[in-house]
Image (cartoon, rainbow, N blue to C red):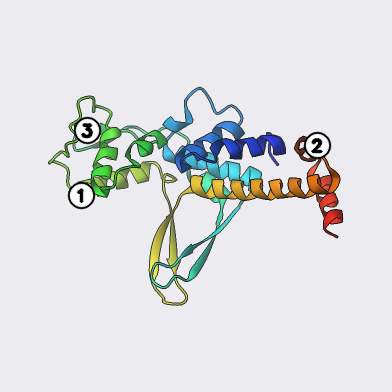
Amino acid sequence: MNALGNAGFLRLWENGHCLHSLDRGLLAIQALLPRPGTEHVADWSLGRRNQALARLHQECFGPQLQGWMKCAQCGEKLEFVLDSRALIERHRDADPEPIVFKDRAFRLPTSRDLSLVAAESDTKFAAFRLADLCRIDAADSPVRNNAIPGEWTGEELEQLAARMSEADPLAEISLFFECPTCKSQSEESLDLATFFWAELEAFARRLLYEVHLLAVSYGWTEDEILSLSDTRRSIYLQMVQA
C-alpha cells in the first residue's frame, strides 16, 4: 500500500493520534513522501501542502475522494466525490512573486501561520493576524503586539485574501452543494489534512481489527501478522470468518 508497510503505517497513525489536524497532515507528508526536501513542510504554501496530501491520497487510497457533509438547514446527508488528480493539477509549482497590496508585500500563508491563529476565537482578529504574519516587512508589526491596525478594513482583508487565493488556487478547496430535500444552497470548505487523516485512521483501525482476529485464532504476534502480504492475510481472514 505504501513504502512504510503495514507496521510503519500503524506507527504513523499512532504517532499522530493525539496531534492537531494541521500537524497530522504535515506528519503524513514527512513520513510518506520520498525526500520532501530540506525546507520544513510547515513552511510550504497551503496549496503545495494540499497538493502533497492529494498525491498521498492517490497513492495510498486511490484517486477518488468520497465523503459527505450535513446540510446546515435540514440535516440531510450531502455526498461528494472529488478526483485527487484534478486537485494535483490545480497547484502551481512555481513560487509566486510577493503579493503587493496597499504598498506592502505579502507572501502566501503556510501551515505554520495557521497554527499561530488557530486558537483565536475572534475570526476578524484572526484574519488580521494571519495577514500580518504573511507581511514580508512586518518586523515591528502592531498586530504582533495585540493591537488591530486601524487602516485595515474587512473589505480590504477580503481583497487581499482574493489575491492570495488567485496566487495559490489549491490553498482552499470549496465544495458547492444544493440540498435535494430543502433546496438550500451552500458552499463548504474541505480540509484535506483532516480528510486524509480520517481515511488513514479508518484503515489503521481496520488493520488492527484484522490483527486481533488472526492473533486470537492462530496465536500469531502482531509483527508476524503484519508481515503477511495483503492477499495472504485476506485469505486467512476469510477462513477465520467462514
Q: Which mark is residue 224?
A: 2
- Which residue is located at x 47 percent, y 27 percent? 40
The N terminus lies in quadrant: top right
Say which amino acid is labelled 3. Answer: Arg
Q: Are marks 1 and 3 in contact (CB under 8 Å)?
A: no
Disc 1 residue crowd, few under 14, some 14–19, many 20+, Cα 10 Å: few
- Residue at mark 1 to residue at mark 3: CA–CA distance: 17 Å
Q: Amino acid at mark 2?
A: Glu
Which residue is at a point 81% across and 52% down the rendered structure image? 237
Other-residue count near label 2 (Cα within 10 Å), few / some / many at <14 / 14–19 / ≥20: few
Residue 133 horizontal/vertical position (percent): 29, 33
Real-space CA distance between mark 2 and mark 3, rounded to the nearest whole angstrom: 59 Å
Residue 127 vertical placement versus 140 (above, below)? below
- Which residue is at a point 48% across and 36% down the rendered structure image? 93
- Give the mark, 1 or 3, whose residue is nearer the N terminus: 3
Task: List x then y, in percent, for residue 138.
Answer: 23, 28
* Residue pointed to by mark 1: 154
Secondary element at image label 2:
helix
Residue 15 position in % (x across, y down): 57, 35
Decide if residue 62 is in sight here.
no
Dot 3 crowding, Cα within 10 Å, few <14, some 14–19, many 20+ = few
Say which of 79 and 217 sits in front: 217
Task: Give the quarter of the image for residue 160.
Answer: top left
